[in-house]
């Protein structure tokens, strides 16, 4: 495989990992009968399973992606989490947040291609 495919794998992993963050937030919004059920439920266990699997994917992709590029690609997670917040939880995006996301995207593009 070529470098762009590994970069795509990493960004896909970041996207999937953002879904695990969504699952954790959904779980935190519920009330549970006891502390054990709060931490041992389908959403929490599934989220940590996904996060662990994605960490293994990151370890694999870092064999082929320069160390200087990996964290830049992982920064796309901020964008994904913000978009999930808007679409799933109805959160509002301020002008500052939109500007910050544009800066993140510009940084990813500049670091990836130049």
Image (cartoon, rainbow, N blue to C red):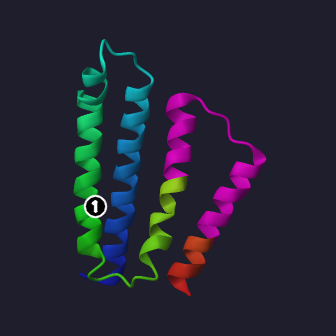
Check disc 1 and report the residue beneath it.
55
Determine which quarter of the picture holds residue 39.
Answer: top left
Which residue: 33% across, 59% down?
13
**Percent coordinates x, y for residue 81 in the rendering:** 50, 47
How crowded is the residue under tag 1: few (<14 C-alpha within 10 Å), some, or many (20+)? some
**Percent coordinates x, y for residue 85 in the rendering:** 54, 37
Image side of residue 91 versus residue 99, left or right: left
Image side of residue 24 versus residue 106, left or right: left
Q: Point out the residue furthest to the front here.
A: 35
**Percent coordinates x, y for residue 67 in the rendering:** 40, 82
Determine which quarter of the picture holds residue 92.
Answer: top right
**Percent coordinates x, y for residue 110 in the rendering:** 60, 79
Task: Say if 48 sits above or below 112 in the image.
Answer: above
Image side of residue 109 versus residue 53, left or right: right
Task: Say if 32 sits above or below 106 in the image.
Answer: above
Task: Say if 35 sits above or below 7 in the image.
Answer: above
Which residue: 62% across, 33% down?
91
- Taking depth in this image into account, of 22 and 44 the one nearest to the observer is 44
Q: Point out the residue furthest to the top here.
A: 33
Q: For numbered disc 1, what is the local secondary structure?
A: helix
Which residue: 22% across, 55% down?
53
Image quarter in which the N terminus is found? bottom left
Image quarter in which the C terminus is found? bottom right
Residues rendered magenta in the picture: 79-106
Determine which quarter of the picture holds residue 104.
Answer: bottom right
């Amino acid at each position: 495989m070529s470098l762009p495919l590994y970069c795509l794998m990493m960004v896909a992993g970041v996207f999937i990992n953002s879904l695990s963050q969504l699952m954790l937030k959904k779980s935190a919004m519920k009330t549970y009968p006891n502390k054990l059920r709060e931490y041992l439920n389908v959403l929490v266990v599934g989220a940590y399973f996904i996060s662990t699997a994605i960490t293994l994917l990151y370890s694999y992709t870092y064999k082929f992606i320069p160390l200087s590029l990996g964290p830049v690609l992982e920064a796309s997670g901020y964008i994904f989490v913000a978009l999930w917040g808007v679409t799933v939880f109805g959160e509002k995006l301020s002008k500052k947040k939109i500007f910050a996301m544009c800066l993140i995207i510009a940084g990813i593009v500049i670091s990836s291609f130049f």
